[in-house]
Each structure stands twice: as structure tokens, then as C-alpha cells.
């Protein structure tokens, strides 16, 4: 006979608990960041010549998604000490004790391995190799070495996030060409103004955690100038597809408008009212705006490239 006491001993399925746990594992993948990373990878694939089987294309995009998420999980495993110190990151699943560090590492390594093997099986060795190299570059070169050792961490480490267009192209063709390299260069040069805008208003966090980000080491004024310089170089490089006749008027017009907007943001950051050390007196509104615009910039620039490719260049 079953009694009330016996029934209460049966483990019960708690949907809310499972949902919360799933959300924590999902958060380890840095999903919002990888949405744009994956979009640039898909853009590289769509720009490539020839026709790729749509199922293979979806698998390749899934692999880029898995790989960048896995690299994010390994980054969060390694950075658990500094993430616990910074206000922006203290509530992440590992420092907050919601996911065990060894489980997070196992998850990151397992997902990385699966993504590379699946990419190899579904597409080719070149795409799988660049994918593996990107994971290594972000999780080891950037996270375990550059991030804690040099204020140029973002400039060099930014390469990790710039590989996906090359991965997408390689997955579709088995080779590389000038266009995926130009797309790499665009994301590579976009990363410093993207990150330094954020680091201007997250500077205190990085200082407390002892991370040598540019505003911590060289000050806010120097960082503001670097944002403008990189934005100007990025603007010039964004026009290379047009100069090389790889894109038509639609892309050129999109790029010029976005460049004007981004340079305008960088100038506003530079002219923001500041104290003698370069710290903003206006609550970092201009830096926040530049960070937000950086996200819009890269998304719309690659949309422009795709629209031009399919509608204008045929
Ligand atoms: C080494 C290079 C990079 C660094 C250090 C960096 C750093 C950051 C940081 C610290 C944040 C705030 C995230 C948070 O609060 O959780 C962020 C946000 C973001 N990053 Fe980057 N980033 C880099 C490269 C990239 C790349 C290559 C992409 C995409 C192509 C990208 C896309 C994004 C997006 C979409 C967000 C907004 C996430 C949100 O809305 O919460 N980042 N980045
Ligand atoms: C295909 C592949 C593997 C691509 C990798 C691309 C990738 C995941 C780029 C991530 C960029 C990023 C969020 C850097 C922030 O790291 P952080 O540690 O400085 O930021 P945090 O302080 O928010 O953790």
C-alpha cells in the first residue's frame, strides 16, 4: 500500500529547477555575444562562390555556434576568479556557485571537440582547422595569456572573434580568398573600438580585478584617442570590398553611412566632458552609445554586404 510518507520520498521532477539549470548552462556559452559572431560566420559562408547544400550549411553554422559557445565556457572557467570580483560578471554561473568549475571545463572541452569533429565530417579539414585554431586563440592565447598580461590584449586577441567569416567561407569552398581575409580585417579592426568603448565605463571593475585593460594602464584620454584612430582605420578598410569590385553601390553607401556614424560616436567619446585624468563627467553616456553603435555597425555592415551580393552583384 502506498502511503503519503512513501510518496513524498519519490524524487519529483521540478520543471522550474531544470529550467533554471538549463539557463545557467546556456549562459556559459555567452549567447548574446555569439549571436553576432555566428552571423559574421554565416555571412562569410553566404558570400562564398558556388552552392552549398543547405543542410551542410546549417550544420557548419551550428559548429561555429558550438565552438564559440565552448570557447566562452572555457573563458568563464579560467576567469572565475576575476569574474567574481567584477560587478558586471559576479552573477555568472561559476563565481555564483550555480555550476561547478570542473563541470564547466568538461562542458567547454567536450563541446569544442564535438564542434571541430562535426565541422570536419560535414565540410572539410580547412574549416575544421580554422575553427579549432579560433577556439585555441580565444580560450588559450587571449584568455589565459594576453588578457592578464598586456593592454594590447584586445588588439591581438581580437583575431579570435574575426576568424568566423573565414571559417564560413572555408566551409563552403574548402579554400580561402581575398574576400574572407577582408572580412577578417574588418572584424579585427572593429574589435578595439567595440571593446574599448565598454572598457571606458567598466574601467573600475577591471582595475579592481587587476586586468591591464587600456584605460586602466594608459588612462581614459589615451583610450579615447585609440578608439578614434581604430575607427578611422576601420572606416578605410570597410571600403576595400568596393575598391576591389567585390561589392557595389549598395554596400558602399551602407559602409559610408555607418562609418560616418561610428566616427561621429568616436568623436563624441573624445569630446565628452572629462576631468584632468580623462574620466567622463557626464556618466559615460558617449562611451555607452559608442559601444551600442559598434554592435549595430558590424551587423548592418555585413547585412549591406549580403544585400549587395544577392541584389546588386547578382
Ligand atoms: C577579444 C575580442 C572581444 C572582446 C574582449 C569583447 C568584449 C566584450 C564584452 C566585455 C562585452 C560585454 C559582455 C557582457 O557584459 O556580458 C561584449 C559584448 C558584446 N560583444 Fe564583444 N568582445 C570582443 C569581440 C567581439 C566579437 C568578435 C563580436 C561579434 C562579432 C562581439 C559581439 C558582442 C556582442 C553582440 C555583445 C553584446 C552582448 C549583450 O548584449 O549582452 N564581441 N563584448
Ligand atoms: C569560432 C570561435 C571559437 C570564435 C570565438 C569568438 C568569440 C567567442 C569571441 C568572444 C569575444 C568576447 C566575448 C570576448 C570577451 O572576453 P572577455 O573575457 O574579455 O570578456 P568578459 O569579461 O565578459 O568575460
Image (cartoon, helix red, strand yellow):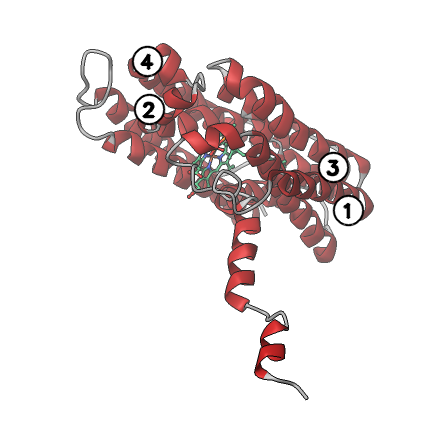
Q: SS of the residue at dot 3?
A: helix
Q: How far is mark 1 from mark 3, CA to CA?
A: 11 Å
Depicted 194 relative to depicted 219: above or below: below
Q: Is residue 132 left or right of 43 when viewed as pictured? A: right
User: Comparing marks 3 and 4, which lies closer to the viewer?
Assistant: 4
Q: Choose between 297 and 274: the one closer to the eye.
A: 274
Q: How far is mark 4 from mark 2, CA to CA?
A: 11 Å
Let me know if residue 250 appears in the view: no
The residue drawn where x is 65% and y is 31% is 134
The residue drawn where x is 55% and y is 55% is 21
The residue drawn where x is 62% and y is 69% is 11
Q: SS of the residue at dot 2?
A: helix
Q: Earlier in the sequence, mark 2 or mark 3?
A: 3
Q: Earlier in the sequence, mark 3 or mark 4?
A: 3
Q: Which residue is mark 4?
A: 219
Q: Residues within 10 Å of mark 3 (few under 14, many from 20)?
A: many
Quadrant of image for the N terminus: bottom right
Say the numbered circle drawn on residue 204.
2
Q: Earlier in the sequence, mark 1 or mark 3?
A: 1
Q: Which residue is mark 3?
A: 127
The residue drawn where x is 40% and y is 41% is 296
Say the numbered circle drawn on residue 118.
1
User: Comparing marks 1 and 2, which lies closer to the viewer?
Assistant: 2
Question: Badges 4 and 2: C-beta atoms under 8 Å apart?
Answer: no
Q: Position of residue 34 (x, y in %)?
A: 54, 43
Q: How far is mark 2 from mark 3, CA to CA?
A: 39 Å
Amino acid at each position: 500500500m502506498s502511503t503519503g510518507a512513501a510518496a513524498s520520498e519519490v524524487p519529483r521532477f521540478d520543471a522550474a529547477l531544470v529550467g533554471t539549470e538549463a539557463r545557467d548552462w546556456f549562459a556559459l556559452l555567452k549567447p548574446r555575444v555569439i549571436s553576432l559572431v555566428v552571423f559574421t560566420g554565416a555571412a562569410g559562408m553566404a558570400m562564398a562562390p558556388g552552392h552549398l547544400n543547405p543542410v551542410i550549411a546549417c550544420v557548419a553554422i551550428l559548429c561555429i555556434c558550438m565552438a564559440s559557445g565552448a570557447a566562452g565556457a572555457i573563458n568563464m572557467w579560467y576567469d572565475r576568479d576575476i569574474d567574481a570580483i567584477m560587478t558586471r560578471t559576479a552573477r555568472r554561473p561559476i563565481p555564483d556557485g550555480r555550476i561547478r568549475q570542473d563541470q564547466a571545463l568538461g562542458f567547454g572541452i567536450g563541446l569544442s571537440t564535438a564542434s571541430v569533429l562535426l565541422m570536419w565530417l560535414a565540410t572539410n579539414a580547412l574549416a575544421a582547422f580554422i575553427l579549432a585554431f579560433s577556439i585555441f586563440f580565444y580560450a588559450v592565447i587571449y584568455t589565459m595569456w594576453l588578457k592578464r598580461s598586456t593592454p594590447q590584449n584586445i588588439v591581438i586577441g581580437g583575431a579570435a572573434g574575426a576568424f568566423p567569416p573565414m571559417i564560413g567561407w572555408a566551409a563552403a569552398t574548402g579554400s580561402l580568398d581575398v574576400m574572407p581575409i577582408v572580412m577578417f580585417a574588418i572584424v579585427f579592426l572593429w574589435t578595439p573600438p567595440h571593446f574599448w568603448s565598454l572598457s571606458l565605463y567598466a574601467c573600475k571593475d577591471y582595475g579592481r580585478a587587476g586586468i591591464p585593460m587600456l584605460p586602466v594602464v594608459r588612462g581614459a584620454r589615451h583610450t579615447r584617442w585609440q578608439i578614434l584612430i581604430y575607427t578611422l582605420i576601420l572606416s578605410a578598410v570597410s571600403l576595400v570590398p568596393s575598391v576591389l569590385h567585390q561589392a557595389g553601390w549598395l554596400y558602399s553607401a551602407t559602409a559610408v553611412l555607418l562609418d560616418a556614424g561610428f566616427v561621429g560616436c568616436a568623436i563624441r567619446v573624445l569630446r565628452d566632458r572629462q576631468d584632468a585624468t580623462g574620466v567622463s563627467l557626464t556618466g559615460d553616456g558617449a562611451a555607452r552609445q559608442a559601444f551600442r553603435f559598434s554592435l549595430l555597425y558590424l551587423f548592418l555592415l555585413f547585412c549591406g554586404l549580403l544585400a549587395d551580393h544577392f541584389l546588386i552583384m547578382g
